[in-house]
Amino acid sequence: MLSKPALAKFGNTVKGWLPAIAGSQPLTVFPNVGSAGLLTNSTILGQIQQGVPADLAVTYIINNLAGTVPFLSNPNAFVGNVTTNGGLARYNSLRAEIRRRFSGGFAYQVNYTFQKTLADSTQDTQQSVDPYLDNANQKLNYARTQYDRTHTINALANIELPFGRGHRWLNEGWASKIFGGFQMTNIVNISSGPPVSIVDNRGTLNRAARSGLQPATSNLTTDQIKKLVGVFRTPNGVFLIDPSVLQATTPSGQVVDLRQQLPAGVNFNQLTIRGASPIGTAPFPGQVFFLNQPGSTGNLPMNFINGPMYLNWNAGFFRNINLREGTKLQIRAEAFNVLNNAQFNIGEGSGIFNVNSVTFGRMGSTFAARIIQFGARLDF
């Protein structure tokens, strides 16, 4: 596509092609679009140069410029959602559990699940619209769901401290009243990290509004990409991918190494961090992810990467004080995320691996840090 100055050089009365340009061929679609495709319009030119033919078609349709080009299978409907029970989902698992009922002041339960969930709708709410990446190839959407966790361990324990009346130690007199009645509860959750994709969410085949989960393109295999993924703590933040495959630039255009201290006067939040070079620019050294070509949905699968492992421990410590028959005071102290682990918010909706993002691979959003609360309850 020529720029406006180039078009002006040959005159703006171009009827589909420029015979004066070597390799120029007559256009077959644009002459049939309203106003000959408005090929000098900045919006139209931008969408052509960005390689998003689906969004270009949308622009023509919503502005009544489709002409005689059959962009729509049904000319009487632009966007149509069909709700059916034709979805495909498969869940396979192995589960094991051990438990002990409360006896001798101690009870516990531990279960382990090894599983895999595959579906052509990877989201987990009834309100979600999960469109096909390609209506003509619906199998592209068949992948791990965003709630798939390969390994999950849940454990809980209720421990009554062995002090006070009816217990082994300090079970008489004032010692029993002071040290008796203490109990501790624990809940531990451990699981594999959530699945995540390398995404190029532009309208290269389906329109952008239907391409939010569209995978990007890479020159590496999925196994090679998995070896690049992990928690990388650098002087400039935490990344979910090896920073060596990223390009970071300052507002002045200076390329910096994310694994090193930034130059004086450069703020990390001012950096542009890319996983792929923009349209029209050459790949940067070490680049392994690329924008999709027009008409493509990328060559990577959906949700093939596991995020960081999830580990959470909640605990409660309380004491029951018998005030009189039928009346009891309970004093509680509870802690959520006892170890204060950083639980990073990643997955399909986080956009952490969107190659169009200027913070590609950076982990910034986390769930709640450790919370401690105290309370009292009177039972009568």
Image (cartoon, rainbow, N blue to C red):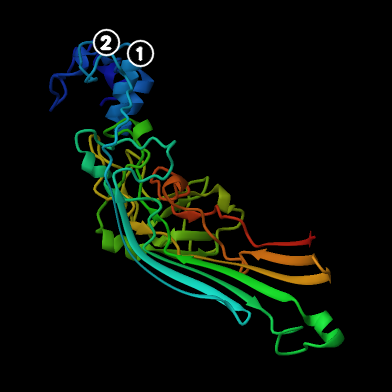
Q: Residue 146, can we see it? A: yes
Spot occupied by residue 345 in the image (x, y as percentages of width and height)? 51, 53
| In the foreground, 172 or 271 | 172
Q: Report if the CB atoms under discs 1 and 2 are less than 8 Å apart.
A: yes
Depth check, front residue: 311 or 233:
311
Rendered residue at 27%/43% (across/down): 141
**Residue type marked 2:** Gly
Q: Which residue is label 2 attached to?
A: 34
> Which of the 4 image quarters holds residue 102?
bottom right
User: In percent of the image, x 80 and y 71: which residue is there?
Assistant: 321
Amino acid at circle 1: Asn
Asked if 74 appears above or below 109 in the picture, the reply is: above
Q: Which image quadrant is residue 186 in?
A: bottom right
Q: Is residue 257 left or right of residue 115?
A: right
Q: Position of residue 38 (x, y in %)?
A: 30, 15
**Which residue is found at the position 63% from the left and 60% from the top?**
369
Q: CA distance from mark 1 to mark 2?
A: 9 Å
Label 1 neighbourhood size at 10 Å, few (<14), some (14-19), many (20+)?
A: few
Quarter holding the C terminus is bottom right
Quarter-of-image position of residue 374: bottom right
Camera-nearest label, 1 or 2: 1
Side of 313 relative to 43 (left or right) = right
Of the pair 61 and 243, the residue shown nearer to us: 61
Q: Residue shown at 52%/45% (left/top)?
A: 251
Question: Mark 1 vs mark 2: which is more N-terminal?
Answer: 2
Query: Label 1, on which residue?
Result: 63
* Dot 1: element: loop
Residue 106 picture location, percent across and down: 60, 79
| Residue 135 drawn at (x, y percent) | 23, 33
Category of crowding for the residue at label 2, using alpha-carbon neighbours closer than 10 angstroms: few (below 14), some (14–19), many (at least 20): some
